[in-house]
Image: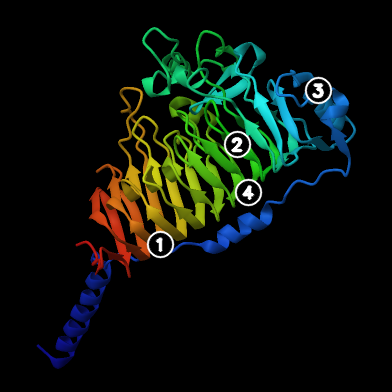
Amino acid sequence: MSRQNNLKIAITLSLLSVFFFSCAPKHDKPTAYKADWTKMKDIINSVKEPVFQNKTYLVSDFGAVADGVFDNTQAFKKAIETCSANGGGIVSVSYGKYFTGPIHLQSNVNLHLEEGAELLFSTNTKDYPIVHTSFEGVELMNYSPLIYAYQKSNVAVTGKGTINGQAGNQNWWSWCGKDVYGWKKGDPIQNVKRLMEMGDNSVPVADRLFGDGYYLRPNFIEFFDCKNVMLKDIKIVNAPFWIIHPIKSVNVIVDGVNIISHGPNNDGCDPEYSRNVIIRNCSFNTGDDCIAIKSGRDTDGRRVNIPSENIVVQNCKMFDGHGGVTMGSEISAGVRNVYVENCDMDSPELDRAIRIKSNTRRGGFVENVCVRNLRIGEVKESVLGIDLFYSIHGNQTGNYMPKVQNIYLENITVKNGGKYGILAKGHAESPIKNIVFKNVTIDKIGSNYSVENVENLQFINTTINGIQIEQPK
């Protein structure tokens, strides 16, 4: 064979080796997911506080009496409607206790509670008309929320006063059916099953009539299909059910609100099907999740199909609750772009700091959850909990595989971490992807982590119980 042929063969083999090497599968370690904090700044810059006319309407001028006994429902109604009809402004509630039925807000109205003003809401179901609302992620016609805005824009509740739902074991709470909340055998109990069946069978919302005889508790403050909403500085106590519930709403600010309410399902703030929501400078001491981001339940959530997205939580304090910031379990339309920063969480009754929950009946997705600068004193179960087998209300298996990816925690200090740093359980068919712990220090914890079906779990400069954590193999 000539030298020229040998050279041709060598060149050919060399080219082939390059070709096969370039096509061969690569087994490089996946890179860590990186949080995009510029997106958070864009969200904050896009949400402006609503502006109101410089006109004030005193509820006392419309017949309101601050003795804690007189029914002020009509006085509030007249003041709010007059204010809105004249182009909007401030409906002012001065010092004293005001007993009332539900308050329905109108566009361009700021309901302002002066310091020392307290709204005492009726616990008589006859005072609550049937309206289009929601219960545990399923739309229905039920008792009006205590404070309610439906398809309004530029609305607010502000001031240093107190909003008191007067819920307790003697009225709303016992309907949940638990003896710890006052329920006894033979007492009324909520008919959740009927509503869930209607949602699964796609019964039109207008035909999902509840109210008396069904014992589904009303939400406390609900903004339904609203734009440019603000709650600022108020104190909220003793809620019947979910406390602050923006649903299908856009541009929402919850600022400086102090919540103390330990009833059943007393979530602090539940943005649902909502976009561009800022929750800041608030204090949560609740009977359920402090903040729970939702997007509808099962068939009804898939019918509506509006993800909750662009949610910012800043400078908040979380005390008692099932989770500090939670996504789910009513999450069938998905959640994306959640930013949590500069928060303090601390209570022996706080189960988890960051929590994600779904199952194959809920389905949905959670993606791009970015958390930084948390100071955690004590949590009971885990710093990060992800449960995609979450079970409540009977069989929760179905054909809708939940998807979770891109969960990022940075600059977290935990004094007493409970049982696990991370407790995450995914599905083999749909693993949880991309969990990053960066600059995290956790002390007094039982186990570093317990994970099933998690891909690309990254520890970067993370220390647990004084030992730097190595990458899982």
Q: CA distance from mark 1 to mark 4?
A: 23 Å
Q: Earlier in the sequence, mark 4 or mark 2?
A: 2
The residue under label 3 is which amino acid type? Ala
Residue pictured at 40% horizontal, 62% vertical = 412
Residue 412's label in the rendered image is 1
Crowding at dot 2, Cα within 10 Å, few <14 / some 14-19 / many 20+, comes out as many
* SS at circle 1: strand
Pick the residue in front: 239 or 132: 239
Mark found first going from the N terminus, 2 or 3: 3
First reached walking from the N terminus: tag 2 or tag 1: 2
Q: CA distance from mark 1 to mark 3?
A: 49 Å
Image mark for residue 75: 3
Left or right: residue 167 versus residue 126 is left
Residue 239 visible from this viewpoint: yes
Residue type, label 1: Ile
Would you name the residue on which mark 2 appears? 236
